[in-house]
Image (cartoon, rainbow, N blue to C red):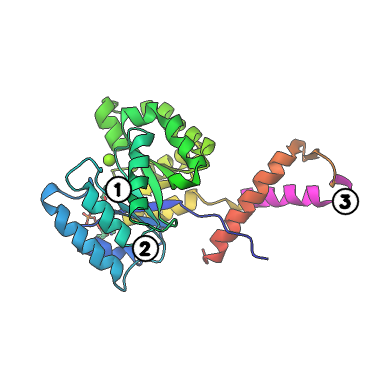
Amino acid sequence: MHEPLPRLRRSVLYVPASNEKALKKSAVLACDAVVFDLEDAVGPEEKAEARERLRGFLAGPDRPGCEAVIRINPLSSEWGTEDLLAARACRPDAILLPKVDGPRDILDAVAALDETDAPRSIRIWAMVETARAVLNIGAIAELGRDPAARLSCLVAGTNDIAKETRVSERAYLRPWLMQIVLAARAGNLTALDGVSNDFRDMEAFARECTEGRAMGFDGKTVIHPAQIEPANETFSPTAEEIADAEAVVGEFAKPENRFRGVVSIKGRMVERLHLEQSEALLKKARTIRKRGE
Ligand code: COA
Ligand code: MG
């Protein structure tokens, strides 16, 4: 029997729907998911044209094979409803809602999708990028436990949070980013770290990826092709972690340990909860290997 493989969302690339060249390029990049953007990356005068361009692109032969997500404008904006209908027609894996303030914004989008009999396979991702979203994060994440709410992923929108709160350094955003991770775990959701704007500074980017991973994020949103590989690398299990996990699985598989709750490996206490952690890590590593990485 085949086990379901975990979804990888190590690198999630934003692609402005207004940029024909970037759209075409997205098909050949090694990111785990693409977010086609109709919102912040598209100017007000370009909105309608970008929507049509995206529709044509996703119906054509260059549609990427990875997870495809469309970020629409807020439903309360003049473009929101048309964006949602156009996005739904493109049958993406998910629709990413910007400027979510609380559960109501997600439930409104769910109602609009349900009204058009949108397939259940179309999930919702939510940007957490307003002060109210951070304050309401527990209630937002609760929706993750309700399959009818379609919610599958929380995305930190660090540029907008910084703008609204006037926080100017990532160091001071960390408590809110940790709230997002905690909420994602409570709601069984993926948590994605915010973008690094300075796409030429690869050292700073690598540091930010390492930090995001240690904070518990599943992956990083990226804005430039050069950021994909380092994000994939950082959010993949290392050879050392894989060897450790194999040792844990091997230890519990020994006949004398079959019924034991705790064992010791090289002076370290290892419990069955570590066995579960190790099995999840090995599963992720297998998924990555299957991709030929
Ligand atoms: N997706 C796909 N392709 C991209 C890309 C992206 N996000 N960003 C750059 N590229 C492509 C360029 O088209 C160029 O392609 P080419 O080699 O065929 O000419 C190549 O990668 C190199 O790009 P580069 O010249 O280094 O950058 P740029 O000046 O063209 O673009 C940005 C810089 C920041 C404008 C661009 O990366 C971008 O628009 N990023 C996404 C922004 C976004 O979506 N923001 C909203 C969410 S935060
Ligand atoms: Mg934003």
> Helix, strand or loop at disc 1?
loop
Rendering quarter of residue 164: top left
Image coordinates for residue 96, horizontal then vertical, percent: 34, 48
Q: Does the residue labelled 2 lie within 8 Å of ligand 1?
A: yes
User: What kind of residue is marked 3?
Assistant: Pro
> Helix, strand or loop at disc 3?
helix
What residue span does the magenta drawing correspond to? 240-257
Image coordinates for residue 76, horizontal then vertical, percent: 22, 40
Mark 2 packing: few (<14 Cα in 10 Å), some, or many (20+)? some
Picture residue at 46% right of the left edge, 52% below the top: 9
User: What kind of residue is marked 1?
Assistant: Phe
Mark 3 packing: few (<14 Cα in 10 Å), some, or many (20+)? few
Q: Mark 2 points at which residue?
A: 29
| Distance from Cα at disc 1 to Cα at disc 2 | 16 Å
Ligand 2, what quadrant?
top left
Rendering quarter of residue 106: top left
Q: Is residue 183 magenta?
A: no
Q: Tell us which disc is closer to us: 1 or 2.
A: 2
Q: Mark 1 points at which residue?
A: 199
Reply above or below: 129 against 83. above
Q: Does the magenta stretch include residue 251?
A: yes
Which mark is drawn over residue 255?
A: 3
> Can residue 209 be seen in this snapshot?
yes
Residue farthest to the bottom, as pictured:
61
Reply above or below: 156 against 232. above
